[in-house]
Image: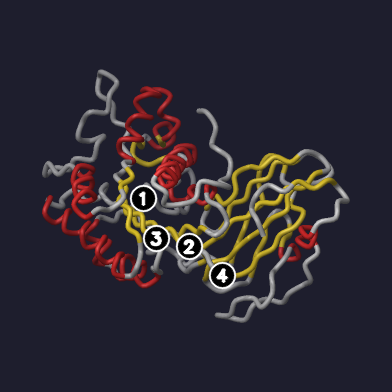
Amino acid sequence: MSVASVRLRAGAVSALVVLSTVLPAGPARAGQAPSRPLGIEHCTGGACHFDVPPGTYDVTVLLGGDTASATAITGEMRRSLLAQTEVPAGERVARGFTVDVRTPEGEPTGADGSPGLDLVIGGAAPALAGIRVSPARHARQIFLVGDSTVCDQPGEPYTGWGQQLPRYLRKGLSVANHADSGESTVTYLADPRLWDTVRSRIRPGDLVLIQLAHNDKTTDEPTYRANLETLVASARERGGRPVLVTPVVRRWFNADGTLDNGTALLVNGLGVDHPAVMRSVARTLDVPLIDLTARTKALVESLGVEDSKALYLTNEKRDNTHTSARGATVYADLVRQELVAQHLIPPGAQAHEPGPL
């Protein structure tokens, strides 16, 4: 079913009406995907639970009601799956997304979380008219390899940009966020719960976005370069398409209002310029590069000392490294823009833009 907007006048005849009248289906047996789509009977009180095994699932929702509505959907470990969608009174709008269900459901070294697929129906005036969940047959995965600025953060106010990326993707593209707090290129390669797990799940054509730098504080340049090269080569061996992503800047201003310093631009104590090394590896190995350092630097400097605080946890935690939900949403959109510009994902059917600050 297309994820393009479909607006239905109340009472109009459409195959989408089946979303709210799907025949009841019993829970899937352990380790077995459901034999037929699951529907709205699995939703109560603004939450939906689908007893499905780990895997990739297509979700189509029908939004709207008798009065004007505004509905957003999050799921699993605080992932933003659908941006707030407004529907006029008496109309219906169909939206779709694809979601990765795994254990652990958040950070790879964290708690298992709850089994199955859990969705939260939120927004200013939520109205869910129907829902359909079924195994994704031809989904393409976007694996995320990164640190705490990327990961599915378990608790507010912390939010990784990878947590917000799904809201910008069309149905058929799924984010498998394997970023983990505190990891460097050294530790990510060493822990079998991390790179070994990602590598085993890569299928031909999957994207593998790699943003590791913040915790390589004691990694020398030859080691850092070699680790990036290992990640790239290993992903390619599995048929994946690696993409190097330079790290988001730290909000660390100079007196002149710029971020032209080692702290902001991720130069470690050994003098290793992580973004510069990543750019060099991308050129040498002919790997797509998303220069998120340059993009976030330009944005933070343009906002200035005060307005840029909204992107980080400056006020809440005196933290100028980790992003707020707002900052993560804006930075996820920068990643999405680059993926589209480099023809790594299709341009159409993304969710709504985050809007001005």
Say whether residue 315 is left or right of residue 40: left
Q: Residue at x 60, y 76 (%)?
A: 33
Q: Nearer the viewer, mark 2 or mark 3?
A: 2
**Mark 3 surroundings within 10 Å by alpha-carbon count, few (fewer than 14), some (14 through 19), many (20 or more):** many
* For marks 2 and 3 on the same chain, the one whose residue lies earlier in the sequence: 2
- Asked if 50 appears above or below 336 in the picture, the reply is below
- The way the protein has been coloured in the rendering is secondary structure
Q: Residue at x 81, y 56 (%)?
A: 14
Q: Nearer the viewer, mark 1 or mark 4?
A: 4
Quadrant of the frame with the N terminus: bottom right
Q: Look at label 2 and name its amino acid.
A: Arg
Q: Secondary structure at mark 4?
A: loop
The residue where tag 2 is placed is 140
The residue where tag 4 is placed is 137
Instruction: Find the distance from the CA under tag 3 to the CA under tag 1.
Output: 11 Å
Q: Are marks 4 and 3 in contact (CB under 8 Å)?
A: no
Instruction: Find the distance from the CA under tag 1 to the CA under tag 2.
Output: 24 Å
Instruction: Find the distance from the CA under tag 2 to the CA under tag 3.
Output: 16 Å
Q: Position of residue 20 (x, y in %)?
A: 78, 60
Q: Position of residue 161 (x, y in %)?
A: 43, 46
Q: Residue at x 37, y 64 (%)?
A: 109
The residue where tag 3 is placed is 178
Q: Position of residue 87 (x, y in %)?
A: 74, 41
Q: Look at label 3 and name its amino acid.
A: His
Q: Look at label 4 and name its amino acid.
A: Arg
The residue where tag 1 is placed is 148
- Asked if 346 appears above or below 89 in the picture, the reply is below
Instruction: Find the distance from the CA under tag 1 to the CA under tag 4.
Output: 31 Å
Q: Residue at x 45, y 66 (%)?
A: 104
